[in-house]
Amino acid sequence: MKTIRSVKKIFKSIPTLEGAGVHLKRAFGYHQVPELDPFLMLDDFHSSSPSEYIAGFPWHPHRGIETISYILKGLVEHGDSMGNKGVIGEGEVQWMTAGRGIIHQEMPRGEKDGRLWGFQLWSNLPASYKMMTPRYQEIKAPQIPEVTLTDGVTAKVICGSVNGAQGPVRDIVTDPEYLDVTMPASSVFEHPVKGGHTVFAYVIEGQAGFDEVKTSIGVETVVLFHDGDGLMIKAGSAGCRFLLVSGKPLGEPVAWYGPIVMNTEEELDVARRELSDGTFIKD
């Protein structure tokens, strides 16, 4: 590694209501565009009270993006206009490429004690892929490799690679990496990343220093990095767990209307009109 990335900016997640009344924390979203290009939004839904999430996310459309759901506790039932049906639970991933249009629903269910914990990340698609054929991938926990590194650090590899272990989600146009990293107390995690790619971490347990300055950053915080080709992270006295995500920026205009993200207002108008007249879903 030649250049260790330093911390560019941090965002503290904020409470938000979404869907039919789901209480969640929004780590970043509309107001951070285009700082995290190609990523648009990250939501953290974490609750022990079913009343805060049971209404879920009933049928709604998407176009022009990918939605990535990762579950730590509880489960989420999925159904969509392509006929896909499934349930993802602990340690599992739903990677949905909406492309030219899909209508789906996501209905969360907690564990026996009511606990639910998961994340949904939105990743943008470039203009040339926004109207691609929709695709749905359901990744079960045994498919996700877990790599043990120096100092007892472990990394679950959803997308990308760590020490030769390749994640099960592949052939994604923005060339993303998505890791779930757990660090014991005072351990060090060194990891190469691609220069020019957007890289961020989202802290979900404990705290760590995310660059050579080693300023302690705690839970429910997004850490956005400057450019470089490596990371060096040191866990605090209680250890740390974080999601590490990177991807190739698109550098394109963003026109955003709820669950639809295109490049121009005219394209949004087309989507709204098609939703109104029943032609949104393409054969």
Image (cartoon, rainbow, N blue to C red):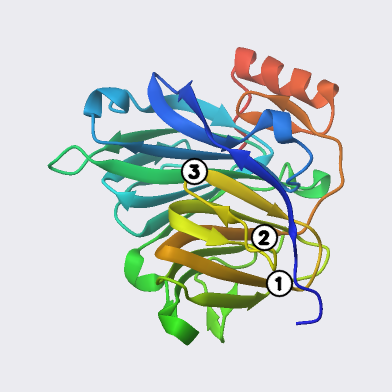
Relative to 76, is 2 on the left or the right?
A: right
Q: Residue furthest left?
A: 112
Marks 3 and 1, how far apart at CA: 23 Å
Relative to 237, is 281 on the left or the right?
A: right
Name which residue lies at 63% across and 14% down. 277
Q: Quadrant of residue 266?
A: top right
Query: Considering the image in quadrants, where does the C terminus appear?
Result: top right
Marks 3 and 2, how far apart at CA: 18 Å
Which comes before the other along the chain, label 2 or label 1? 1
- Dot 2 surroundings within 10 Å: few (below 14), some, or many (20 or more)? many
Would you name the residue on which mark 3 appears? 220
Q: Is residue 159 visible?
A: no
Q: Is residue 183 above or below residue 270?
A: below
Would you name the residue on which mark 2 appears? 246
Marks 2 and 1, how far apart at CA: 8 Å
- Residue 74 place in picture, x, y as percent: 26, 46
Q: Is residue 176 above or below residue 14?
A: below
**Element type where label 2 sits in the image:** strand
Would you name the residue on which mark 1 appears? 193
Front residue of 42 and 262: 42
Q: Are marks 2 and 1 in contact (CB under 8 Å)?
A: yes
Q: Is residue 61 visible?
A: yes
**Element type where label 1 sits in the image:** loop
Relative to 264, is 236 on the left or the right?
A: left
Name which residue lies at 61% across and 58% down. 245
- Dot 1 surroundings within 10 Å: few (below 14), some, or many (20 or more)? many
Q: Amino acid at mark 2?
A: Ser
Query: Considering the image in quadrants, where does the N terminus appear?
Result: bottom right
